[in-house]
């Protein structure tokens, strides 16, 4: 079995977000980049499947050379090989098309992505990629069990969950639940050493069309000072929520 | 030219997010001088009520093969409706089911997809619209030159506007194909009577300061009094005091209710990212230095185990008098 795990290279969750060039570009100054947290759950699940079935796991990213440390980290966690498609990932349709061009030739049985990246949060690449490849797509995936080519998956729905069944190939856009937080794999020294020798192939980007552009960014307005209320006078809070905030 | 809005149903009924999306589509169509058509699938409500939110025509699909949500089939049904009406803009709610169909529709139609949309477009040529980005730590203006568009609207961001229009309904047919049914739904497990987090107007949330799962009774009581949904911080979901589906924050669910009440949550940057779009924030925390107070509108420094019961009493008194 061949598994492809798509990896986004994103600012660490503790990052303060700032913009540069007249608020048209993300300011990556001082930012630590990591594997997209949603992708980590899928990568760990792929490792578990690899150990149970002998599957091979390829990780892929669309990005510049600066994303390679993130791919190396995925190799250190245990992926067999990595692919970087050399292009700036500026738009979902563009990225999905480049990934599809690669995946089409490789015949993966299972493709796992995060449900969205924590930077642009489009949540668009997984469903587009599945559609370009003409395979089923499951979003917000919180559980996966395989029996041969038969797959049972659980997806989060608004206010609950749904269990689905189908045959591979398919694409799952995962999140926490695919594995638990405590089971997430982190690179060990041995893995880091081994990762240096694993193949990381760079592919030049083919033809792909961008559908959207970002004109500019803005940060949320700073909040006015917090109104402090005495712990012995919670009635004042109720009154303010009613008369000032008008929410009750 | 027309605008098509997918009016999503949950267990056969419309919810607030549906009316918001319909209202958005109606305003959009009005601005560009075209008509808006709604599509409902497996809806048991009276679809004409969508007229109140500005649509003139509602297509209804009541095909047995589409009774249960199926993202491939629903996406294809929405595409079929768009083709038959000549719609080039499709509006969808950014719910879990909306997110499951939107990218399929966009990929099949070669349409531009813009998700997490917060507002009506600031320009129509090129189409430019504000969306959430960086996990709600920032906003971005996205634009597209594409004629074909799929716009996915953040629930709770745009109010539904009632009009005095009325809608005519027309049945529309789409039958799921073999390829639509490559995945089959085995079971749906839904929490009954619970308010969906992303749609809730008020959310009451607890953190590690509550010290244990057994102390959530007062959170639930407070939530019930306020008609609120309950939520929690990431550590609480990770320890297993509360289900993952309640985790709000950067890697959980992003919410933007009218009122967010955070109890025993210090306000780490990852938590703030998911909740700072809330219109009003109340923070109750023992630690006066908790960073959450800087992002709050109202704050109480105090022990949750003393403050929350008092707040419950004060709300009961308020309710009796109002």
Image (cartoon, rainbow, N blue to C red):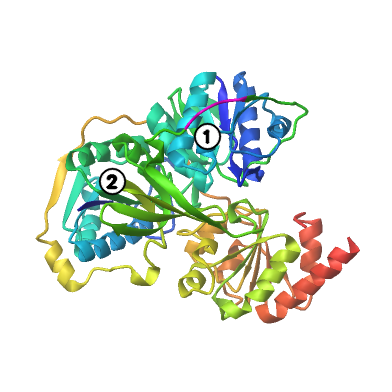
Q: Relative to A72, does residue B147 appear above or below in the rendering?
A: above
- Which residue corresponds to mark 1? B129
Determine the residue positioned at 81% across, 63% down.
A239
- Which residue corresponds to mark 2? A169
Q: Position of residue B163 (x, y in %)?
A: 75, 30
Residue extending furthest toward the front: B64
Residue extending furthest toward the right: B321
Left or right: B191 with respect to B313?
left
| Tag 1 and tag 2 share a subunit | no
Q: Is residue B2 visible?
A: yes
Left or right: B147 with respect to B228?
left
**Is residue B320 within the magenta segment?**
no
Q: Nearer the viewer, residue B303 or A101?
A: A101
The boundaries of the magenta stretch are B171-175
Q: Residues within 10 Å of mark 1 (few under 14, many from 20)?
A: many
Chain for numbered disc 2: A
Left or right: B62 with respect to A144?
right
């Amino acid at each position: 079995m061949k598994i492809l795990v798509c990896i986004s290279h994103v600012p660490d969750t503790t990052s303060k977000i700032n913009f540069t060039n007249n608020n048209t570009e993300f300011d990556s100054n001082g930012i630590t980049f990591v594997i997209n947290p949603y992708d980590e759950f899928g990568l760990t699940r792929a490792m578990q499947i690899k150990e149970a079935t002998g599957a091979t796991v390829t990780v892929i990213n669309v990005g510049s050379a600066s994303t390679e440390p993130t791919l190396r980290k995925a190799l250190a966690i245990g992926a067999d090989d990595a692919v970087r498609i050399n292009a700036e990932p500026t738009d979902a349709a563009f990225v999905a098309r480049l990934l599809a061009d690669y995946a089409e030739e490789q015949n993966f049985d299972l493709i796992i992505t995060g449900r969205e990246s924590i930077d642009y949060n489009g949540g668009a690449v997984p469903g587009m990629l599945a559609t370009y490849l003409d395979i089923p797509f499951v979003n917000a995936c919180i559980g996966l069990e395989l029996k041969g080519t038969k797959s049972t998956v659980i997806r989060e729905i608004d206010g609950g969950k749904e269990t689905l069944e189908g045959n591979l190939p398919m694409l799952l856009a995962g999140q926490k639940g695919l594995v638990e937080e405590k089971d997430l794999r982190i690179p060990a020294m041995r893995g880091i050493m081994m990762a240096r020798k694993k193949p990381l192939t760079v592919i030049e980007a083919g033809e792909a069309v961008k559908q959207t552009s970002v004109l500019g960014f803005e940060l949320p307005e700073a909040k006015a000072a917090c109104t402090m209320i005495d712990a012995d006078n919670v009635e004042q809070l109720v009154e303010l929520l009613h008369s000032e905030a008008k929410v009750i | 030219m027309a605008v098509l809005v997918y009016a999503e149903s949950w267990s056969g009924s419309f919810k607030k997010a549906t009316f918001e999306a319909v209202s958005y589509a109606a305003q959009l169509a009005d601005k560009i001088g075209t008509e808006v058509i709604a599509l409902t699938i497996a809806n048991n409500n009276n679809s004409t009520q969508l007229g109140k939110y500005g649509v003139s025509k509602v297509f209804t699909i009541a095909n047995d093969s589409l009774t249960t949500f199926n993202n491939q089939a629903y996406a294809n049904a929405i595409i079929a409706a768009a083709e038959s009406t000549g719609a080039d803009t499709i509006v969808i709610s950014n719910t879990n089911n909306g997110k499951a169909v939107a990218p399929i529709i966009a990929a099949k139609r070669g349409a531009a997809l813009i998700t997490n949309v917060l507002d009506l477009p600031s320009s129509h040529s090129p189409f430019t619209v504000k969306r959430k980005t960086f996990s709600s730590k920032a906003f971005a203006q996205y634009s597209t030159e594409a004629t074909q568009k799929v716009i996915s609207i953040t629930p709770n961001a745009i109010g539904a506007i009632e009009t005095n229009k009325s809608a005519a309904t027309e049945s529309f047919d789409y039958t799921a194909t073999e390829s639509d049914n490559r995945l089959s739904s085995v079971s749906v497990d839904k929490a009954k009577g619970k308010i969906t987090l992303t749609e809730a107007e008020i959310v009451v949330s607890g953190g590690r300061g509550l010290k244990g799962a057994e102390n959530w009774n007062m959170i639930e009581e407070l939530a019930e009094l306020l008609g609120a949904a309950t939520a929690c911080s990431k550590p609480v979901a990770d320890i297993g005091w509360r289900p993952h589906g309640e985790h709000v924050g950067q890697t959980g669910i992003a919410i933007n209710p009218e009122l967010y009440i955070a109890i025993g949550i210090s306000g780490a940057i990852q938590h703030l990212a998911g909740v700072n779009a809330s219109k009003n924030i109340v923070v109750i925390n023992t630690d006066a230095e908790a960073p959450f107070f800087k992002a709050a509108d109202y704050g109480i420094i105090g022990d949750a185990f003393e403050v929350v019961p008092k707040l419950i009493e004060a709300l009961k008194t308020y309710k009796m008098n109002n």
